[in-house]
Amino acid sequence: MKAVIYHNPRCSKSRETLAILDETPGVEVEVVEYLKHPPSRDELARLYARAGMTAREGLRIAEDAAKPLKGADDDTILDAMAANPILIERPLVETDKGVRLGRPPEKVREIL
């Protein structure tokens, strides 16, 4: 099984999630450092749809750049995430079984 993780190596939750993926037998992991190679707006929309999440639920609200998005709709949030990927909550993991936000990291086991 292939798993794609949208990863930030500076994030402890992202590192913990990657460790779960690496330790799971039969999982081929593709690491995308999303701050260097951000997903497009359409790709983010697709990932959140597969995860059953809204863009707002995928917004990293702890970032100062998220404050102006407090009352924004999902389209505006997706545009902001595509322009400034630090706003993307991490890590997102996709397999053929679905997409999960690794918060907590153990949630990715649902799609392995």
Image: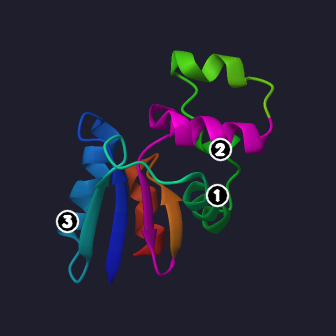
The location of residue 20, given as percent across then percent down, is 26, 61
Q: Amino acid at mark 1?
A: Ala
| Distance from the alpha carbon under mark 2 to that under mark 3 | 29 Å
The location of residue 82, given as percent across then percent down, is 55, 43
* 22 on left or right of 71: left
The location of residue 94, given as percent across then percent down, is 45, 68
- Asked if marks 1 and 2 touch (Cβ < 8 Å), the reply is yes
x 51%, y 21%: residue: 63
Q: Nearer the viewer, residue 51 or 43?
A: 43
Q: Could you tell which of marks 1 and 3 lies nearer the N-terminus?
A: 3
x 47%, y 81%: residue: 96
Query: Regarding mark 3 in the picture, which secondary structure is present there?
Result: helix
Q: Is residue 96 above or below residue 67?
A: below
* 57 on left or right of 95: right
Q: Could you tell which of marks 1 and 2 lies nearer the N-terminus?
A: 1
x 56%, y 20%: residue: 65
Q: Amino acid at mark 3?
A: Asp
**Residue 86 in magenta?**
yes
| Distance from the alpha carbon under mark 1 to that under mark 2 | 7 Å
Quarter where residue 47 is shown = bottom right
Query: Regarding mark 1 in the picture, which secondary structure is present there?
Result: helix
Q: Which mark is residue 22?
A: 3
**Residue 104 in magenta?**
no
Query: Circle 1 sits on which residue?
Result: 45
The part of the chain drawn in magenta is 73-97
Q: Nearer the viewer, residue 109 or 39?
A: 39
Quarter where residue 8 is shown = top left
Could you tell me which quadrant the C terminus lies in? Answer: bottom left
Neighbourhood count class around disc 1 (C-alpha, 10 Å): few under 14, some 14–19, many 20 upward:
some
Query: Circle 2 sits on which residue?
Result: 78
x 62%, y 68%: residue: 50
Q: Could you tell which of marks 2 and 3 lies nearer the N-terminus?
A: 3
